[in-house]
Amino acid sequence: MEFNDPKDKAFLTKQIQSKQSFLAIGLDSDITRIPKHILETKSNPISYFNKAIIDATHDLCISYKLNIAFYESQGVPGWQALEDTLKYIPNELFTIADAKRGDIGNTSKQYAETFFKTYPCDAITLAPYMGSDSIGPFLDYENKWSILLALTSNKGAFDFQLIKDEDGKELYKHILDTSSRWGSSDQLMYVVGATKPSYFKSIRDIIPDHFLLVPGIGAQGGSLEEVCQFGMNKDVGLIVNSSRGIIFASEDRDFDKAARKSALKIQQQMAKILESSGI
């Protein structure tokens, strides 16, 4: 099935229906965990590793999420691996730069150019703490997505994101309320961690139509069934990410086969959920 730009909600929904999957595979390609035979024989082991993972899994997912830290930490070879990987990913797949950027306007403008033009991804994760002028430069790009951190999956999320004001309203709800007015639901997504499924209902009360990028299943222990129970909308509205549990299912020569097996298990769970939901 062919898909054409723009990669809007309708595009994503068609992908989900076609593949019976709303899986994003996180290419958190930690060079210390790449199989030794690749490190010993390949000039750019991250690039080789990513291509093998993509070959093994591209039919099971709708998206690849590239955690930028694992590329920029390697200097020039890492940035080259990022470029090689983006060129290799099939065009119909949704690409996310997991960069968590967000700065004053002129700096954000440069970050937007980096990840929407120089290394052209479909979406980027952003920290909204500095407000609308830090997000605006990303929203200026047509057919691109800004994915704002709302309620994350890590333990430290409780340090700030759940702080309540005098009326008992948590900070993450203020973020959702305010930022959802900056752009449309074809421009904005939100990161909501799978380890906090009970919060999805209140989140959907605020943003019923937006897609949510959901990390935290697999290695972090989140439940796919609970996320879907509370977080799905009429368009599915979820892109559920798994990284280490797929790409490092094996750190031996069978790494690509093991990655496919792990991704297939999640895709099959998603297909059952979609069937039972009538989507």
Image (cartoon, rainbow, N blue to C red):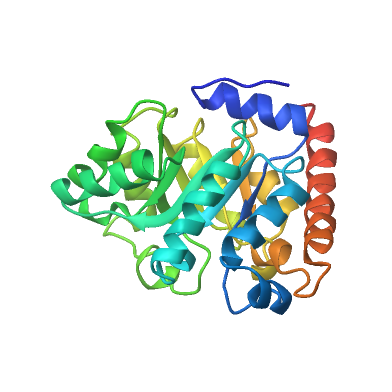
Residue 118, given in percent of the width and then of the height, sits at: 35, 43
Tell me where residue 117 sits by quadrant. top left
Residue 242, given in percent of the width and then of the height, sits at: 66, 58
Q: Nearer the viewer, residue 81 or 213?
A: 81
| Residue 34 visible from this viewpoint | no
Q: Residue at image x 71%, y 66%?
A: 245
| Residue 62 visible from this viewpoint | yes
Q: Residue at image x 82%, y 39%?
A: 271
Q: Is residue 34 above or below residue 62?
A: below
Residue 75, given in percent of the width and then of the height, sits at: 39, 69
Q: Nearer the viewer, residue 177 or 21?
A: 21
Q: Assign the C terminus to one quadrant of the image.
A: top right
Residue 109, given in percent of the width and then of the height, sits at: 21, 43
Q: Residue at image x 83%, y 50%?
A: 264
Q: Is residue 4 above or below residue 36?
A: above
Q: Nearer the viewer, residue 183 or 43?
A: 43
223 relative to 260 in the view: left or right: left
Q: Is residue 233 above or below residue 10?
A: below
